Image (cartoon, grey):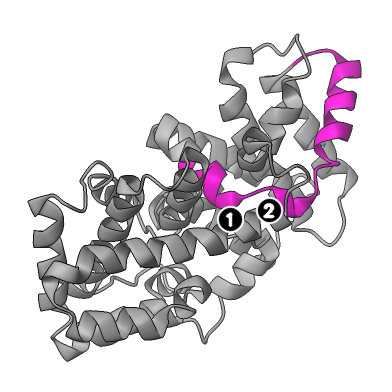
Amino acid sequence: MFENLKEKVSILFSPKNKSIMAQSLQNPAYVPDSDERNTQLLFWKLLLSAVSSDEKLDQAEKYLFEDYVFEQCLSEKEWKQILSFKNISTEQDEFLEAARNLLSSIQKPELFNAFKTMIANDKILRSLKPQISSTLESERIENIPLHYTEWERNIVGILRKKSQRNAIDVNSVEYLSNPVAFRLKKYPKIKQKKNLDIIGAKLGLALLIIYSDLETRYKEKEQFKRLIEKYCTRSEDRIDRITFELMSIPENHLEMAYFGRFLVEVLDKEHRIEFLKELFQIARSDNEYSPYEDRDLRVISKYLLLDHDDFISAKLASKKT
């Protein structure tokens, strides 16, 4: 989290990155080993359960952690599987049974190696690698909930510091999560006022596509203004003012993980594909579509939890409009 789009593309398309996420982007035909992936997902389920059970964390910190876990998902199905543990307490039998299954899985060398690869390719988990690896290799099951609580608090602490570093006003939780919607609320005549959070997430991702170019080109800006016209207002004066205000939001305040997670939760797959078409139209607005822009949009597609076929469908459809 907290990387801009160019940085995220560089990380995920690096040949050195052996994470399942990177491999699925670099090779659309890639299919992860099911046992390896289930072991990794089990770990994220248990961590999310620990976070949800932790009374020392406030709601903003829990949402921040959810954004982080969302980044680890390859599909909407995986995200729903992880969310199924959100309301399971670390004291419940279901949590302990899942912890036993994880310990049993990583006793197999190939699964433990896959688990270590996941940790090695995540810079936040990497800082906790010694304690996580040694604990899961040797720990007694009755002590596991305490360790998960310790791990999630360490992760939340790292996430909190990073989010505060990027914030103008760290007391404004609303701005931290969706700065676009926060800015739009000052305009009383927005035509879809009740959908401001959705509009903010969409325009936030659109801004990331624009910022990913070395320079903001006139036609991209004009296409962005057409999105504002579609979602916000038909007044040319207000369109210009909103465009200026939104494009003044620093790029490092626009968090892809939040925008993606929110849109996945409120929009069905068909609506997310339609929105991806709009992002393609921004990328194509200057009549140039480079391999770099293709990678940018592949990453955005991943954050919308759309698969390769969905990506190709949106890409082809955008050529016809």
* Figure quadrant of the N terminus: bottom right
x and y, in percent, of residue 108 in the image: 13, 86
Nearer to me, 206 or 1: 1
Q: Look at 34% across and 72% down and name the residue there.
A: 30
Q: Mark on residue 160?
A: 1
Q: Look at 52% across and 41% down and name the residue there.
A: 60
Picture quadrant where residue 243 is located: top right
Q: Is residue 154 left or right of residue 32?
A: right
Q: Do the residues labelled 2 and 1 touch (CB within 8 Å)?
A: yes
Label 2: which residue? 164
Secondary structure of residue under mark 2:
helix
Q: Mark on residue 89?
A: none
Q: In this view, does 78 lie to the left or right of 251?
A: left
The residue carrying pointer 1 sits among few (fewer than 14), some (14 to 19) or many (20 or more) residues within 10 Å by Cα, namely: some
Residue at mark 2 to residue at mark 1: CA–CA distance = 6 Å
Q: In this view, does 50 lie to the left or right of 69?
A: left
- Whether residue 251 is in magenta: the answer is yes
Q: Is the magenta stretch mostly helix, strand or loop?
A: helix
Secondary structure of residue under mark 1:
helix
User: Which residues lie in the magenta part?
Assistant: 233-261
Q: Look at 49% across and 79% down and name the residue there.
A: 127
